[in-house]
Every structure is written in C-alpha cells, then in structure tokens.
Image (spheres, rainbow, N blue to C red):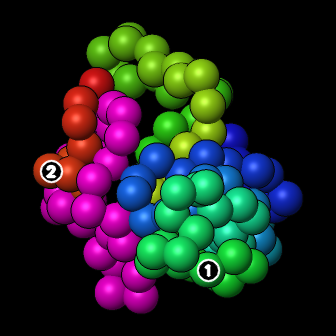
Amino acid sequence: MIQQQTILKVTDNSGAKTVKCIKVPGGFKKKIAKLGSIIVVSIQKLRNKAKQTSKVKKKEMYKALVIRTKVIHTKKTGFALKFNENAVVLINKQGNPIGTRIIGPIPKTLQNKTFQKFSSLATGLL
C-alpha cells in the first residue's frame, strides 16, 4: 500500500530514478494506493547518465501508475503476488507513459483497456 511521503522506484526510461508520493487522489476516505492506482508524485533523484538528456526534471510533479507493491495482492483464484519493491511508471496529462520502455514485470491484472499501452511496453507479464 502506498501513502503520502512514500519513496518509490521508477521503472521506465524517462530519466527519473526515485519519486515521492505527494497525493493519492480519491477524496478524504481514500488515503492509500494499491496496484493499478494513479498517484501524484514528485521527482527526487535522476539517473546519473540521463541528467542532461532526461525527459523529466528534478522536483517537478507528475502523475504515476503503481505497477508493483510490496504488499501481497491475492487474486480470486488464490494466486498471490508479492514484489520486492514499490515501483511506478510516470504518465503525462493524457494518460500515456512518458518513457518508451518499462523494465521488469507487470501483473496481468493491469491488462484492461485503460492500461493496455503499459502492458505492451513491459518486458514481462505476471
């Protein structure tokens, strides 16, 4: 579960390395983000090689899609998913990914119509 002030890893080639969650949209009662949620983040660190050619800048705010969490996500079939890190993919205002490649696996639960673009960019599906 992701909440405010959580440090997350960026798994695309946009140039950002880590981000901090600033806001979980959804009103007063929703304070945590789960797998597949869209959150507002701020860039904390940039990758060393991509500092000059980066698509993003440090301390700017972007929206991001949560694709991996440390909390166990159980499917209806009884299959449980757990990852070693909390990871996100940066998206622009139109909802498209900023990077052109997603590193690492993405769960098959994100293969619905709204996130179909992300599953085609990923290296593996779980």
Residue behind mark 1? 57
State yes or no: discs 2 and 1 in contact (Cβ < 8 Å).
no
Which span is picked out in magenta?
92-117
Q: As shown in the figure, which amino acid type bears the numbered disc 2?
A: Ser
Q: Residue at x 35, y 23 (%)?
A: 76
Q: Position of residue 67 (x, y in %)?
A: 45, 45
Q: Residue at x 76, y 50 (%)?
A: 7
Q: Nearer the viewer, mark 2 or mark 1?
A: 1
Residue of label 2 = 120
Vertically, is 21 above or below 32? below
Give x and y (percent) for residue 115: 26, 59
Q: Rate crowding at label 1 as few (under 14), some (14 to 19) or many (20 or more) other CA atoms within 10 Å.
A: some
Rendered position, 113 above or below 61: above
| Circle 2: element type | helix
Numbered tag placed on residue 122 in the rendering: none
**Label tally:** 2
| Quadrant occupied by the C terminus | top left
The percent coordinates of residue 43 (x first, y second) are 68, 69
